[in-house]
Amino acid sequence: MKWLVFIVILCPIVLFGQGFYIKNGATVSVSESFTLAVSDSLVNQGTLINNGSLVMGGVWLNTGTYVPGDGRITFNSTSTEQIINHNAQAFSWLTIEGGGEKKFLADIVVERELILNDGIMVAENNSKIIFDSDVIITGGSDVAHVNGAVQHSGAGTKLFPIGNGSVYLPVQLDNLTGSPEILVSHVELGGSTTLLKSSSLQSISNQRYFSVEAISGSLQSSTVTLPIRDESIISSMQSAVVAQASALNDPFTNLGSSDFTGSSTNGSVTSQQAPTEILLAVASADLSGVVVYNAIAPNGYEANRYMQIANLPEGSIVTIYNRWGDKVFEMAGYDDTVAGKRFEGVGLDGKELPSGNYFYKIELPDASPLTGFLSLKR
């Protein structure tokens, strides 16, 4: 492939070997439809204006001024690590490929799009990767993610494509309102650290925890989705929940689960409530005491005429759906010992429901919802 370069020189520059050096006071401009490819180091002490494309295979050292314009930049070194010191400035379109580690020594801002094809973005020196509110994030995998802190701003849904260098651990926040700035990172647990849990939790992650901090604005009304990877402590996906704590020496409490996918080795869980504390972890709710007797015969023996649920916590909500997904019954504060507060085969319209299979959902006050099927026979 032939690379075309358009350079506007306002002061002298020095070009050496496969590297590129811009002196203090010099200006280099890469125009639209042109590409500057540098297989070795690029050092900018002057001004570099990018409205085209830069492809970097070596060290990037920007101590001058970089004007991102409408330009794209790709870091594609195939070596073990590629050093990138961008002096806390911005990129418009940033692509990571070539594998290995791309070590960012200072904060960077991505304005329009981050494309994660192949390579780990390592945020060093307590730096962070900062996304503008309208940024698009493409890709993300075990071999392409950010190992470090990610900051996002704006309303709606925000993805934080973080991981630990070998496992992709994306965090997502939904229903953000206003224009909050959220900082997300994670910590892998060593053998000497054990997360504390409240009595509402059966077990809690022995792999990692996440920090989700509102630098400005709030997380009010939002929900958070955490990844589940290699979590041997999760007894079943049905019991998986998001737990939160304000500090490592505080017990984690249950935020509940509104949705979960996958398995305990590769899945995710979404909280039922907005997080109000900074530390989050995947946990398993204690559901051992709740037993659902999932067959009723309204015209049969007395004990079988209604839906019985043993050890149901006070304040639970029970909802029944027919096979088409229509809600036919709902009761807050379900109590199978009280007529009128239990399911006896009568629908919301007061009419008897026909025989068949129904779907139930039990929302517990301090645990993940229970779901299953109920057989009704007349």
Image (tube, grey):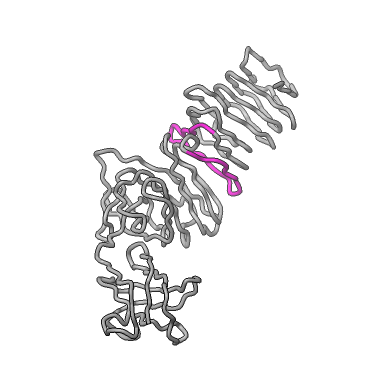
Considering only vertical position in the picture, is 223 above or below 106?
A: below
Measuring from the top left, give residue 316's x and y in whole percent.
34, 72
Count of residue discs: 0
Location of the N terminus by quadrant is top right
At 48% across and 51% down in the image, what residue appears? 172
Q: Is residue 308 above or below residue 66?
A: below
Q: Which residues are magenta?
A: 118-141
List x then y, in percent, for residue 85: 53, 28
Which quadrant holds residue 240?
A: bottom left
Image quadrant in which you'd find residue 90: top right
Residue 99's place in the image compared with 302, above or below, is: above
Return the residue nearer the eye: 332 or 61: 332
Horizontal and vertical percent position of residue 366: 32, 64
Q: Is 133 inside the magenta-drawn segment?
A: yes
Residue 340 placement: quadrant: bottom left
Q: Residue at x 53, y 23 (%)?
A: 78
Query: Is residue 293 one of those drawn in magenta?
Result: no
Residue extending farthest top: 17
Residue 341 percent across, percent down from the top left: 34, 82
Residue at 37% over, 45% down: 265
Question: In the depicted view, which residue is nearer to us: 348 or 38?
Answer: 348
Q: Quadrant of the C terminus?
A: bottom left
**Residue at 46%, 37% in the rendered image:** 142
Along the line of sight, which residue is nearer the eye, 24 or 304? 304
Q: Is residue 359 above or below residue 263?
A: below
Q: Is residue 142 left or right of residue 56?
A: left
